[in-house]
Image (tube, rainbow, N blue to C red):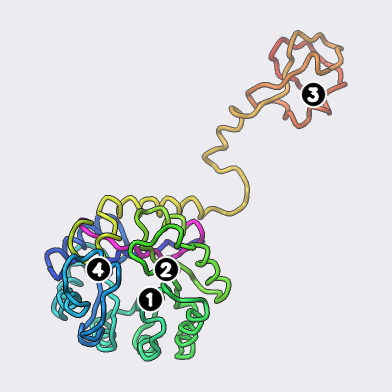
Amino acid sequence: MNKKVIIIAEAGVNHNGNMDTAKQLIDVAAEAGVDYVKFQTFKTAKLVTKSAERAEYQNTNTKNSDSQYEMLKKLELSETDHLELIAYCQTKNVKFLSTGFDLDSLQFLANIGITLAKIPSGEITNLPYLEKMAELYSEFILSTGMANIQEVKDAYQVLIDAGVKPSNITILHCNTEYPTPMEDVNLKAMLHIERELDTTIGYSDHTLGIEVPIAAVALGATVIEKHFTLDRELPGPDHRASLEPTELKAMVLAIRNIEKAINGSGIKEPSPSEMKNRPIARKSIVASKLIKKGTIFSEENLTIKRPGTGINPMKWKMILGETATQDYGEDQQIEI
């Protein structure tokens, strides 16, 4: 691993339809040091039927009687909103990203200059959507929540058949439950995707806390996506499975530290920072008592003690039986 991990802070619909809240989310993401802050772009009428039921987690996290259609309608961002948020991101030195959930939204995002496509888990079996994605964008991040490996392969192949270069696709392991129980994370499935498709991998996380995305980076994830909010107690479908600002900042810091920890040479050798400690922590062969010149070295008159500036104790058996060529005081390092 020699690339910086891309960290996507998923604001999603946690703005609750309020532009001031959306900008505050951008502030938090920028302060945390993420690479992208991501929203969601959709026209409710093109996304769900008016009779579509809400998911169980949406019912749990949103204490009202709105249908899924009514709930989502309140969370739409207008085209003008998008342009305003992009401009605001630029002032905060953080990149704007959004997931389009319908064909018109995909076209709109491409028209305003978005070149990185984030394919959400729910669209992995949407053939026309995937083909439109391939037509409009140059880079792709594909989430795989709810999918089995064959469905992942099928979606990947749609992109490849449409002319997308494999090197431009990153596939994220994901579990689409908000929040995801730890026993359902199955993090090693990320490595299964890597083996089966020989592709760049990442992880989109919906667990509570920051441990799992950090572990994913240690396992080789090159992209991490994580929902965040201003306050988990706010009303809305995704707040409860989102990080609060201090947690997002802690996750970013931990990931950057893990990057440093695993970006070494991969060769087991002393690091520059620890070389100075070798003579202090290691030991040498020394006299355990007064030794007169001409005395035979033995286990009775030799021992091993710090510092490690003398003969390496790995030569212990070579020294035993040799003859002292000088007098040695107690604790004096042996010389041959």
- For this rendering, which residue is in front, 123 or 84? 123
Which residue is disc 4 drawn over?
A: 59
Q: Are marks 2 and 1 in contact (CB under 8 Å)?
A: yes
Mark nearer the N terminus (4 vs 1) = 4
Quadrant in which the C terminus appears: top right
Residue at point 28%, 69% (across, down): 38
Percent from the top left, x then y, of residue 9? 30, 63
Viewer-nearest of discs 2 and 4 = 4
Q: Which mark is residue 111?
A: none
CA separation, marks 2 and 1?
8 Å
Which residue is disc 3 drawn over?
A: 336
Range of residues picked out in magenta = 218-231
Q: Residues within 10 Å of mark 3 (few under 14, many from 20)?
A: few
Q: Is residue 248 left or right of residue 77?
A: right
CA separation, marks 1 and 3?
70 Å
- Asked if residue 42 lies in the magenta stretch, the reply is no
- Asked if residue 226 lies in the magenta stretch, the reply is yes
Which residue is disc 1 drawn over?
A: 121
Q: Quadrant of residue 179?
A: bottom left
Confirm whether residue 142 shows in the render: yes
Which residue is disc 2 drawn over?
A: 174
